Amino acid sequence: MKITHINPDALYKSPVFTQAVLTEGGRTLYIGGQNGILQDGTMAGDTLTIQTEQIYKNIIEILKSAGATQENVVKQTIYVVKGQNIQEGFAAAQSVWGNTPTAISFMFVESLGVPGALIEVEAVAVLED
């Protein structure tokens, strides 16, 4: 399995995301939308920071259970409820996730399916065969 981050010189380079990711070989892991839910089924807190930190802890646990790490994640889709400070969310994500850029799609939404959720993150990872 090979993962190549593509950031053409003609495009903006960010420490948070990569413009594209090329994968060759391997198996694909699709991680469904994660909210800041604790193991007991309750919401981790009522702020974007706390929920975001919990989401990334959850994603890391899912990756571990599949024999992977953040380095295997090639794409994230992030949904944030309108009115939230996305910079606060990015800072919280990096505090748990570290400096592991992926391709990212981001959008503000009116609401999410889980009551009290301020953010939801989906991820795609590529693992060894």
Image (cartoon, rainbow, N blue to C red):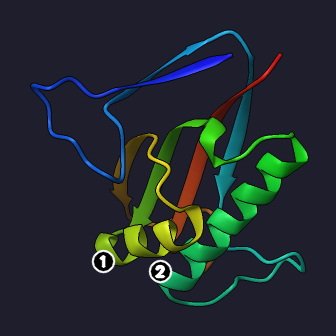
In percent of width and height, residue 86 lies at: 32, 70
Task: Write down the residue under mark 2.
Answer: 48
Q: Residue at x 61, y 62 (%)?
A: 113
Q: Quadrant of residue 116?
A: bottom right
Please state which amino acid type lies under the numbered disc 1: Asn
Q: In this view, does 38 lie to the left or right of 93?
A: right
Q: Assign the C terminus to one quadrant of the image.
A: top right
Mark 2 or mark 1, which is nearer the start of the sequence?
2
Q: How many labels does the image show?
A: 2
In terms of depth relative to the viewer, which is nearer, 104 or 46?
Answer: 104
Reply above or below: 9 against 26.
Answer: below
In percent of width and height, residue 42 lies at: 79, 83
Q: In which quarter of the image is residue 66?
A: top right
Q: Distance between the residues labelled 1 and 2?
A: 8 Å
Reply above or below: 118 against 22.
Answer: below
Q: Which mark is residue 118?
A: none
Q: In this view, does 9 lie to the left or right of 99?
A: left
In percent of width and height, residue 37 lies at: 74, 74
Q: Is residue 35 left or right of residue 6?
A: right
Q: Residue at x 64, y 66 (%)?
A: 55
Asked if the residue under mark 2 is in contact with the one under mark 1, i.e. CB atoms within 8 Å, the reply is yes
Q: Which residue is drawn at 51% across and 43% down?
A: 76
Task: Write down the residue under mark 1.
Answer: 85
Please state which amino acid type lies under the numbered disc 2: Leu
Disc 1 residue crowd, few under 14, some 14–19, many 20+, Cα 10 Å: few
